[in-house]
Amino acid sequence: MAKITKRAVEAAEPREQDYFLWCDELPGFGVRIFSTGRRSYLVQYRSAGRSRRVTIGLHGPVTAEQARKEALNLLGQVARGEDPAEEKATRRRSLTVAQLCERYLEATKAGTVLGRGRKPKKASTLVSDRGRIEHHIVPLLGNRLVQDLTRADVQRFVRDVQSGRTARTYKTKARGVVLVEGGPGAAARSTGLLGGILSYAVGEGVIASNPAQGVKRPADQKRDRRLSPVEFAALGRVLATADQAGESWQSTDAIRLLCLTGCRLREIANLKWIEVDLGGSCLRLADSKEGRSVRPIGSAALRLLRDLRERSRGAFVVPSTRGGGGFGGVPDAIERYTRRAGLPGIGAHTLRHSFASTAGDLGFSDSTIGAMLGHAGSTVTSRYVHHLDAVLIAAADKVSEQVAGSMSGPVAAAQEIAA
């Protein structure tokens, strides 16, 4: 071919075996067409009598013009007697875990490292990843050379995080105080992330195999705590008292929405009116954990949403008490009101699990519960909720009314929790 261009690269059809296209205008510059359909730019040259090859990057994240410029730079180094492949290998051998983590985060942010469902990771997931890197991986392994890591090192990392070696409390400008804890859950999730980072290193040619493979890690703690009807009553009474005292309606009604819908915390905190279909008895979430998702909602939740429509005039269903955006104080509100109700250690996931458990108590199937909760593979993905989905709406009605009934139970029931 005469010249490697975007059109020429994208027109190249995959074959049963990988093959190369070489540029006639810039000898040594080429693109590898994988049998899977991937396309990777590269430079090939000879140094000290040996044929050497340097990968520039995948087509897509790297454009044909960017690849050509990098190829010119690399071939210029060769003309000066340098060996780019050897220099790159030397840099790989001297790469520390901290440097690898930073590269991983940059690649993930750029969308070249895929997460759940072979889709780019969400911004919120990147925040969690960076936190685990900064709080656990870098303190324990950051100065180690990636190529020197062994399975024993990773297994020691698991034990150290589990035993609380990285636990600490520190201050931040944004949130005041951050508590970093260890334990089985932190060890399992941090090791899972470390394994993903090391898999990325294998793909980049930094190491030949992943030392995290085969490492035993603790089972992530199952969060199966649920609220009983009596505990729902205690929480409902505390929320009602807070309303009467003139406390923020955002904080109390956000908790009610979590209880009545089974939604995730961010799905309620960031919920916009454009995503609320009162007539269709559903939420049309544009960007949930599982992507776009339609959630059937029950009559008790609809009553609350209609009431909120009278008070919430902006874009968000539960707006921030200061400035724009959604209400970000939901976690603090949950902690505050559940403590008053004598229910310490309750979080948004507990409220979600309680909704699901109530549905299970009422006899609904796992698939129906999964659709109400928006679980992967169970979400309602149709543009509209038709009559075929009436069973889901009826189920959401029954569950939300059951939860609402428990939350508005008699005072005696609420007080029973303290007995």
Image (spheres, rainbow, N blue to C red):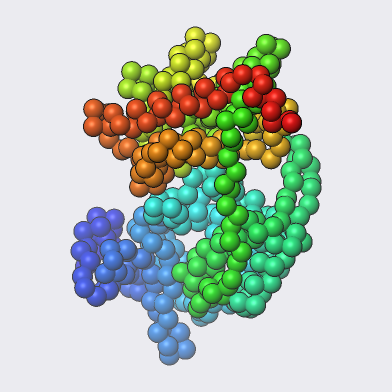
Q: Is residue 290 left or right of residue 164?
A: left
Outermost residue, top side: 310
Identify the residue shown where x is 49% and y is 12%: 307
Q: Closest to the observer: 243 or 21? A: 243
| Residue 185 is at least partly visible in this image | yes
Measured from the top left, where is residue 255 in percent x and y?
58, 27
Query: Residue at 74% across / 43% down in the picture?
Result: 178
Q: Is residue 281 above or below residue 378?
A: above
- Relative image position of residue 80 (x, y in whole percent): 51, 76
Task: Give the vertical position of 144 relative to 50 (above or below).
Answer: above
Give the quarter of the figure containing the N terminus: bottom left
Quarter-of-image position of residue 396: top left
- 319 relative to 99, above or below: above
What residue appears at the point 53 percent right and 79 percent down from the top-left corner?
Answer: 86
**Front one among 43 and 176:** 176
Indicate the position of residue 410 as horizontal and vertical percent values: 61, 19
Q: Nearer the viewer, residue 358 or 32?
A: 358
Answer with left or right where residue 69 lies relative to residue 316: left
Dividing the picture into quarters, in which one does residue 41 lie? bottom left
Residue that sits furthest to the bottom in the current view: 49
